Every structure is written in structure tokens, then in C-alpha cells.
Image (cartoon, grey):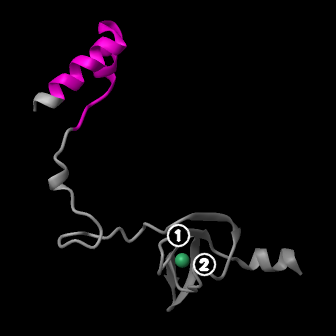
């Protein structure tokens, strides 16, 4: 804890009181022990399922850059069939967002 006070005094001396007050008004400072961190591979580590996710939206696509062709898409069903769907979709493997292809996209390519 003594180190934290010394750092704070050094910070105030460097920045100046007015700037320091403004800094602490605008920001919250989090102090935690490195011993409380759980690193990848250690017991208790929760991996981030979206750590490789990207935003690929724009050009309609059938396959994700990770190679997966299964998508999570919001759909509307009518008479036991998909009647419409949102064009924002998420890769079932890596979580990347992409744009779903539509019939209008196919017609514009022909
Ligand atoms: Zn993917």
C-alpha cells in the first residue's frame, strides 16, 4: 500500500493539482492484486468464446473466414418454413458477425 501512496504523490507532483483533480473527476482508478488474476490455462480461467470474433459485415457470405458454414440467424417462420430472416448473422464457431446472402445478392451477380 505504501507503494501506491508514493505513486499517487509522484503522479500529483508530475501532473499538478488542478490537472490531477480533473483527471480523478473524469476517471475511476482500479487497483487490484496480481495474485487475484487468473491467467489462460490456469484453474478457474473462463475462456472468451468471442476472442477470435471479427466484424465481417458488408459483403454477403456463405462461409466464415474460420471455415465454418453454420450461422446463428434470427428468422421468422410461416407455414413450417423460413419466411424471412435478418441479414446480420453470427458464425456458430468463432462468433464473427457477417452479412447473410439473399436472393437479391445472387440476382445482382448474374
Ligand atoms: Zn467463424
Residue 46 makes an appearance in the image: yes
Q: Main secondary structure of the magenta part?
A: helix
- Mark 1 and mark 2: span between their CA atoms? 8 Å
For residue 62, side relative to residue 14 (left or right) = right
Furthest toward the right, the residue is 110
Q: Position of residue 91 (x, y in %)?
A: 52, 76
Furthest toward the bottom, the residue is 80
Q: Quadrant of residue 98?
A: bottom right
Instruction: Say which residue label 1 marks.
Output: 96
Q: Position of residue 72 (x, y in %)?
A: 48, 78
Q: Residues within 10 Å of mark 2 (few under 14, many from 20)?
A: many
Q: Position of residue 74 (x, y in %)?
A: 49, 74
Q: Quadrant of residue 38?
A: bottom left
Mark 2 element type = loop
Please report the residue visible at 29 percent of the width from the left and 12 percent of the height from the top: 13
Instruction: Say which residue label 2 marks.
Output: 64
Q: Nearer the viewer, residue 34 or 109?
A: 34
Question: Cβ of disc 1 within 8 Å of ligand 1?
Answer: yes
Furthest toward the left, the residue is 1
Residue 33 within the segment the image draws in magenta: no
For residue 61, side relative to residue 49 (left or right) = right
Amino acid at each position: 500500500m505504501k507503494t501506491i501512496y508514493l505513486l499517487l504523490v509522484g503522479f500529483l507532483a508530475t501532473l499538478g493539482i488542478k490537472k490531477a483533480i480533473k483527471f480523478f473527476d473524469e476517471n475511476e482508478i482500479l487497483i487490484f492484486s496480481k495474485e487475484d488474476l487468473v491467467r489462460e490455462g490456469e484453474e478457474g480461467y473462463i475462456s472468451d468464446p468471442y476472442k477470435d470474433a471479427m466484424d465481417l459485415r458488408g459483403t454477403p457470405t456463405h462461409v466464415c473466414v474460420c471455415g465454418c458454414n453454420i450461422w446463428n440467424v434470427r428468422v421468422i417462420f410461416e407455414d413450417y418454413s423460413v419466411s424471412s430472416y435478418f441479414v446480420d448473422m453470427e458464425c456458430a464457431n468463432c462468433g464473427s458477425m457477417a452479412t447473410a446472402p439473399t436472393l437479391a445478392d445472387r440476382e445482382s451477380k448474374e
